[in-house]
């Protein structure tokens, strides 16, 4: 039980824990740990002093550090089914919210997020940039990457620990095979975090075959006559380990966003 991070339990969960027979059996241990946890959720006064003592030791700081919890409080699951028919350069969007702080006293206001997943590359269309010295035409381009883009829809600065849990499949078992983590400060000037190469592009899309493109290092925008990856020409050979489910046609990413200590 020493590995349980009691401060990460909500006050309601701590109250329910009091009814457990284990608390009566190991009274001194539980009352000390639960006292620390309740102090963490109660701002000011002696509670702040007790939490301050915890932060003075590595063991105490660890108790105040969240794990990668898959509960809906801290994140959401983004799923793409029937991966073969998902359009090239397509995007799947997920919108959700998370608490602003780890303790109940800091949970409000909630942080609003918009997450975009590009499993088959990113296509930037041609556009015109209007500047004081004239108009510039910027040509279209393609990024050959499995990209996860996280947009903060909240105005104030937030230091966030970002984690992406990627599901894999082996011998009939679905499991989390890859974890990508990064700490990022979202602000008014930097509201978007792009994570490229979430999965090796060719590992996920290498089973996608068609007439050979002009270059193996890139593929053409959708309206190009040389687009070898148009959805009408797609055939699949083999299966990526990151495609799960009974039909091996589902791509799943669990996004977790928790406040990070400064």
Image: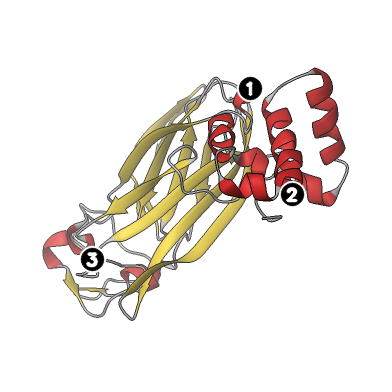
Q: Is residue 26 above or below residue 10?
A: below
Residue 92, image x, y percentages: 30, 46
Which residue is at 66% across, 55% downward? 1
In the picture, measured across the screen, residue 78 lies left or right of residue 209, that is right
- Label 3 crowding class (10 Å Cα cut-off): few <14, some 14-19, many 20+? some
Determine whether label 2 and label 1 are within 8 Å by CB: no
Q: Nearer the viewer, residue 2 or 190?
A: 2
The reply to whether residue 180 is in sight is yes
Residue 142, image x, y percentages: 37, 54
Q: Nearer the viewer, mark 1 or mark 3?
A: 1
For label 1, the SS is helix
Distance from disc 1 to disc 3, alpha carbons, whole Å, reads 43 Å
Which residue is at 79% across, 45% downward? 60
To which residue does mark 2 refer?
Answer: 62
In the picture, measured across the screen, residue 29 lies left or right of residue 112, that is right
Residue 22, image x, y percentages: 61, 50
Q: Is residue 94 above or below residue 110?
A: below
To which residue does mark 3 refer?
Answer: 249
Q: Nearer the viewer, residue 173 or 142?
A: 173
Q: Is residue 197 above or below residue 91?
A: below
For label 3, the SS is loop
Q: Label for residue 105?
A: 1
Determine whether label 3 and label 2 are within 8 Å by CB: no
Q: Earlier in the sequence, mark 3 or mark 2?
A: 2
Quarter of the image where the C terminus is located:
top right
The reply to whether residue 120 is in sight is no
Q: How many marks?
A: 3
In the picture, measured across the screen, residue 50 lies left or right of residue 158, that is right
Q: Label for residue 238?
A: none
Determine whether label 1 and label 3 are within 8 Å by CB: no
């Amino acid at each position: 039980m020493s590995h349980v991070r009691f401060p990460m339990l909500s006050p309601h969960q701590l109250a329910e824990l009091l009814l457990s027979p284990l608390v009566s059996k190991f009274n001194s241990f539980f009352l000390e740990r639960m006292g620390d946890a309740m102090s963490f959720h109660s701002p000011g006064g002696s509670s702040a002093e007790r939490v301050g003592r915890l932060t003075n030791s590595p063991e105490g700081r660890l108790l105040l550090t969240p794990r990668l919890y898959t509960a809906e409080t801290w994140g959401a699951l983004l799923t793409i089914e029937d991966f073969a028919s998902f359009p090239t350069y397509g995007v799947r969007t997920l919108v959700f919210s998370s608490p602003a702080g780890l303790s109940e006293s800091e949970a409000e206001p909630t942080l609003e997020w918009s997450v975009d997943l590009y499993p088959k590359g990113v296509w930037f269309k041609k556009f015109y940039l209007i500047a004081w010295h004239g108009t510039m035409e910027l040509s279209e381009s393609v990024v050959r990457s499995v990209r996860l883009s996280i947009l903060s829809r909240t105005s104030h600065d937030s230091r966030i620990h970002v984690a992406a849990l990627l599901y894999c499949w082996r011998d009939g078992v679905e499991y989390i095979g890859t974890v990508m983590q990064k700490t990022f400060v979202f602000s008014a000037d930097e509201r978007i975090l792009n994570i490229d190469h979430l999965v090796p592009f060719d590992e996920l899309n290498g089973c996608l075959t068609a007439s050979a493109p002009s270059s193996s290092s890139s593929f053409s925008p959708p309206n190009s006559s040389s687009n070898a990856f148009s959805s009408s020409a797609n055939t699949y050979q083999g299966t990526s380990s990151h495609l799960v489910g009974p039909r091996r046609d589902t791509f799943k990413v669990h996004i977790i966003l928790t406040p990070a200590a400064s």
